[in-house]
Amino acid sequence: MYRNHFGLRELPFGITPDTSYYFAAPASQEALNTLMVAAKNGEGFIKITGEVGTGKTLLCRKFMASLGSEFVTAYIPNPMLEPRTLMLALAEELGLTPEKGIEQHHLLKSINQRLLDLARAGKRVLLCLDEAQAMPLETLEALRLLTNLETEKRKLLQIVLFGQPELNRKLQLESIRQLAQRITFHYHLGPMSRDDLEFYLSHRLNVAGYPGNRLFARDAVKALHGASGGVPRLANILAHKTLMLAYGEGRQQVRASHVRAAARDTIFVRRGALRWAGFAVPALIFVAGLLWMYAR
């Protein structure tokens, strides 16, 4: 598409979490520092919240990749599971192969034994749960029971919850107050400032191999921050479209007019208000695609 036009090795603004593109913006770095300190202190529950698209999944993957060899990590991306299914998923992540139809009591006993074996080997076990706001209340309660597994010195299992702000409202419910009281470290991941966004764009372009000077003009950065609200996922979607537009016009720099055109073609969230500005597969992108095809 526009990769060769701008001298890129790969497309820089994908929305798939890729730790090679992790950008240490102040908020992200503070969240990562919080996670590292909490994990090394052996805290039972840690919580990271943020609006849709603020980079929670990427932060989770960066966090797990940053842990030392003394940690064994388990990752469950979709915890909208009943308690038993969640425990089976945890068992599989820990390398266990439970028998089919195993009773929950024996399943928990197997998990406990595995955790004890890992503790004796000097390992800490950390379970990361993405999209935790989707967890049923009974599953959240089962998580609390899992953190009861401990030696005289420390917890056998640490749990990190990554979720949208709805998770906070769920934790305020009386029925799971005991779990909420066990969360000793937490951080809310917010959007990027305009300056952060400018560095973010430059960082991703550099990782993708961009060899030139400023690709996004200052007016484009300002417009992009206004349209995306500093939310990384929205910024990526819009930046990708603006590069397609600039390529379609044969230009070597993105301007505010490209951002405005991309925004008109995008369904996006800005400060909590859902705005419709076109269809998800816009005509302008189709035209840019045609230009690319004929240029091959």
Image (cartoon, grey):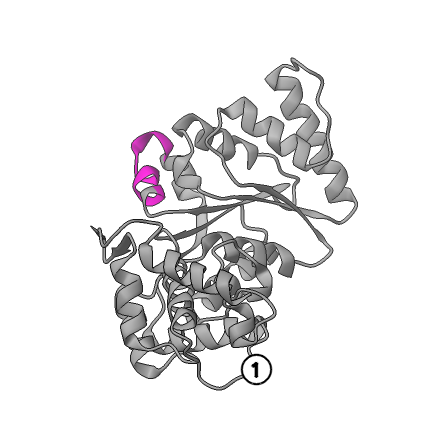
Query: Where is the C terminus found, in terms of image quarters?
Result: bottom right
Percent of width and height locating residue 268: 29, 54
Q: Is residue 121 positioned above or below 87 on the image?
A: below
Residue at x 76% of width, y 49% of height: 122
Is residue 12 magenta-colored?
Answer: no
The answer to whether residue 189 is seen in the rendering is no
Q: Which residue is mark 1?
A: 211
Percent of width and height locating residue 176: 37, 33
Q: Provide the residue span drawn in magenta.
A: 167-176
Residue at x 40% of width, y 58% of height: 233
Percent of width and height locating residue 234: 36, 59
Q: Amino acid at mark 1?
A: Pro
Residue at x 51% of width, y 71% of height: 204
Graded by Cα atoms within 10 Å as few (under 14), some (14 to 19) or many (20 or more), the crowding at tag 1 reads: few
Q: Residue furthest right?
A: 121
In the rendered structure, the answer to whether residue 65 lies left or right of residue 293 reads right
